[in-house]
Amino acid sequence: MAKTLFFDLDGTLTDSGPGIMNCAAFALERLGLPVPERTALRAFVGPPLRKIFPQFGVPEARADEAVQIFRSRYIPIGKFENSPYPGIEALLQRLRESGFTLFVATSKPEVTAVEVLEHFGLAGYFEKICGASMERGRETKQEVIACLLDQIGPPGRVLMIGDTDYDVLGAKAHGIATIGCTWGYGDPENLRRAGALALADTPEELYELLLKEVW
C-alpha cells in the first residue's frame, strides 16, 4: 500500500514564527491592546488565528477585525519573515526517493501556503498543498484534513507530521496517527498528552522513525 504523509507547515517545514509573531504584535497594538513578551506570542504559530486572538484580550466581536489587521501586514511582509528548518529539504527529497507520497495540510490560508512553499523551492515535493479557506468554510486542522481526504480519496497508510497538539487532534478525528516534531512551536508534553505516536527531535530522527514504520 502507498505510504502517505500529511505535513503541517508552520513550525514543521518552515520557521514562520518571526513573521507570525511580528504580525500578531502589530494587530494587538493597532487594536490598543498590550503586546505581551515575545515568548507568549509563540501561541500564534500554528492554530487558527481567530481562536488565538481572544486569548490575548481581543473581544470575540473584534476577532475577525484582528485577523484582517494581522493579514494586512502578513501578506506583503510577514509571510517571508520565515525560513525552512535545517535539514527539511533533504528530508523531503529522501522521503520521495524512499517511496513516500507527500501532502501539506495546514491551517494557514491555502494561497499563502502555496506562495511560501514555492518561494523556498519546496512546493514540488508535494502532490497537493491544502490549507484553510474562509470562503469554503474550512479553518481548523480537522477541516483541512477532511478537505484533503475528499480530494485525494482513500490514501492507504497515512500519517500526520506536525509540531502541535492541534495537528495530533485534527488528524485523530480522521483516525490518522501523528508523529510530533519537537523543533517547532508546540510543547512536547502537549503532543504526548494529545496522543502523538512518537516524537522526533530532528528531521533525521523523523526519517529514521518513518523507515522503522513505527506507525
Image (tube, helix red, strand yellow):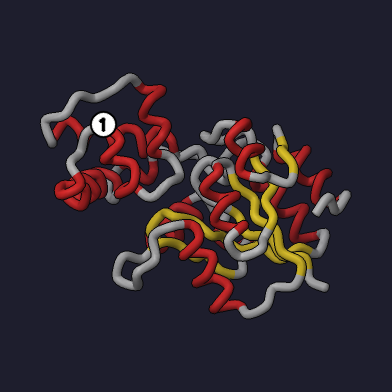
Total labels drawn: 1
- Residue at the extreme top: 37
Q: At 65% from the left edge and 42% from the top edge, which residue is drawn?
A: 180
Q: Which quarter of the picture shows residue 109?
A: bottom left
Q: Amino acid at mark 1?
A: Ala
**Nearer-the-camera pick, 191 or 10:** 191
**Nearer-the-camera pick, 70 or 176:** 176
52 left or right, relative to 155: left
Is residue 72 visible in the rendered image? The answer is: no
Q: At 29% from the left edge and 45% from the top edge, which residue is drawn?
A: 74
Residue 205 image point, x, y percent = 78, 38
Q: At 67% from the left edge and 60% from the top edge, which residue is drawn?
A: 176
Quarter of the figure with the N terminus: bottom right
Q: At 58% from the left edge and 61% from the top edge, which residue is drawn?
A: 173
> Is 100 located above or below residue 43 in the figure?
below
Residue 39 image point, x, y percent = 41, 22
18 left or right, relative to 186: left
Quarter of the figure with the C terminus: bottom right
**Nearer-the-camera pick, 153 or 82:** 153
> Is 60 located above or below residue 149 in the figure?
above
Residue 62 image point, x, y percent = 15, 47
Few, some or many residues within 10 Å of mark 1 (<14, 14–19, 20+): some
Q: Element under label 1?
A: helix
Q: Which quarter of the picture shows residue 122?
A: bottom right
According to the picture, the residue beneath numbered tag 1 turns out to be 25
Is residue 17 visible in the rendered image? The answer is: yes
Residue 160 image point, x, y percent = 65, 55
